Amino acid sequence: MINFDVKSPRIHSWEFIGHLSKLFIEMLKFVLIVVFIFFVFPKLLKWALKGFVVSQINKAQQEFQQQYNPNTNTNRPKKRDGQVDVDFMPPKSGKNSDDFNGGEYIDYEEVK
């Protein structure tokens, strides 16, 4: 025999609305997270990386100019036109230049 005394679970209308509102909130969270991941996050990442790359390029350009452009060196005093500036003087060797006899004579034949 079937027992019909068992009460079937009935959901009242206010409980149903509560379940729908929870479902709606969960779906809204999901949609907002997806929008953030696919639309907002890439734009923020692009903006941040662009700023970082531009700053690194500017830094590299300044280092390059300081290293390879002699006009930017502020340690040197300005010189007038026609004035010669010697940056490096090699050390004198033990041999005296007065002892130089002109080198060794090599005989050659002219080829016609």
Image (cartoon, rainbow, N blue to C red):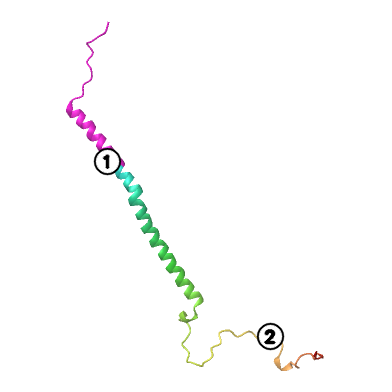
Q: CA distance from mark 2 to mark 1?
A: 85 Å
Location of mark 1 (residue): 28
**Relative to the observer, which residue lies in front, 42 or 71?**
42
- Give yes or no for residue 46 being in the magenta stretch: no
**Relative to the observer, which residue lies in front, 33 or 56?**
33
Q: Which mark is residue 93?
A: 2
Q: How many marks?
A: 2
Q: Please, is residue 103 above or below residue 58 in the view?
A: below
Residue 73 appears left or right of 102: left
- Give yes or no for residue 14 being in the magenta stretch: yes
Looking at the image, do the residues carrying marks 2 and 1 touch, with CB atoms under 8 Å apart?
Answer: no
Amino acid type, label 2 = Ser
Residue under the image location 76 percent in, 90 percent down: 103
Residue 70 pos. (x, y %):
50, 80
For the residue carrying disc 1, how many other residues have a C-alpha within 10 Å: few (<14), some (14-19), or many (20+)? Answer: few
Mark 2 lies on a secondary structure that is loop
Q: Which mark is residue 89?
A: none
Q: Which residues are magenta?
A: 1-30
Residue 23 pos. (x, y %):
26, 34
Residue under the image location 70 percent in, 91 percent down: 97
Residue under the image location 49 percent in, 78 percent down: 69
